[in-house]
Image: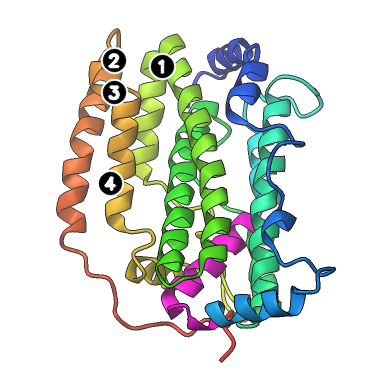
Amino acid sequence: MYNKLVRLEVMKNLGKEVNDFINSYLTPVEKIWQPTDFLPDPSAETFKYDVEELQTYAQEMDYDLFVTLIGDCITEEALPSYESWIMGIDGVEPENSSGWSQWVRSWTAEENRHGDLLNKYLYLCGRVNMREVEITTQYLIQDGFDIGTSMDPYRNFVYTSFQETATNISHRRVGSLAKQTGNTKLSRMCGVIAADEARHAKAYKHFVTRIFELDPSEMMLAFEDMMRKKIVMPAHLMRESGQKAGELWDHFSDAAQRAMVYTGQDYINILSDLLNDWKIEHISGLNEKAEKAQEYLMKLPGRLQKITDRIATPDLQYQFKWVKS
């Protein structure tokens, strides 16, 4: 167990800086892009042509890449779960309109646009069984998730630092691969979402940096604990109609690996980047237990690399109900 009183004091101190965090890492509503900026305009004379162009490129997309795009959309659409989870961590007061609750609401508002954009794209593209996608999304919100953080803000900020970086990679890669086949409009959509995720990742990494300054030993132990458990993706309980919770995740993960959108190597690279960003090797003033955690963390990328090098991605494609046959 962690010391809740110390966590609350650290969060209270950092909460005084929330306005600075919002100004530094989020974009005012009037200035940020909206999904409509990237979608065909129904009132335009070119609407039918624009949709036909969108559908043509969607039909030509590689199956695994297309499935990964759909899964990314579903993950973004489960946002209500993520907001309620962060609102519940120690040090966030939902009834307070200032401080950390304002950060969570503002972050959620930015994230909400991602699912809106991708969902409308998939609806228009003509290649998706939207009812099956909607079933998966509803199940994902209904089933919830257990990411191993409890209500500890330290562990939660490690998780969000890792996860926002992972989503940045996934959206950016889908966009890059789409661009290679001439699908520039989808590439732009994925690109602007990826840019948001990159800003959000910087924010959460900054929060952890500040906590290391205030409570280094406990922050180090929280980081170690999360990496021993392994970071699970927020959609790890993903399923299709007729399935049990989590039954679809391995198939989706395999598709993302085959498409080279998000791989086991990316997991190791993100960990290595966090170790560098937080200067883990050089943090001093740790207690004995935290020093052992520090040593474990610095050796972990090498250990994971040996495991990853031995793992082969299944070649067999799974037929997702999301995609029209």
Tell me if 168 is positioned left or right of 16 in this view: left
Asked if residue 149 can be seen in this view, the reply is: no
Query: Decide: marks 2, 3 in contact (CB < 8 A)?
Result: yes
Residue 155 x %, y %:
48, 32
Query: Decide: marks 1, 2 in contact (CB < 8 A)?
Result: yes
What secondary structure is marked by label 1?
A: helix
Residue carrying label 1: 212
Q: Which residues are magenta?
A: 59-77
Going by the numbered disc 3, the residue's amino acid type is Ile
Q: Is residue 325 magenta?
A: no
Q: Earlier in the sequence, mark 4 or mark 2?
A: 4
Query: Looking at the picture, does residue 38 appear above or below residue 95?
Result: below
Tell me if 128 is positioned left or right of 256 in this view: right
Distance of mark 4 from mark 1, alpha carbons? Answer: 22 Å
Residue drawn 24% across the image and 16% down it: 282
Residue carrying label 2: 283
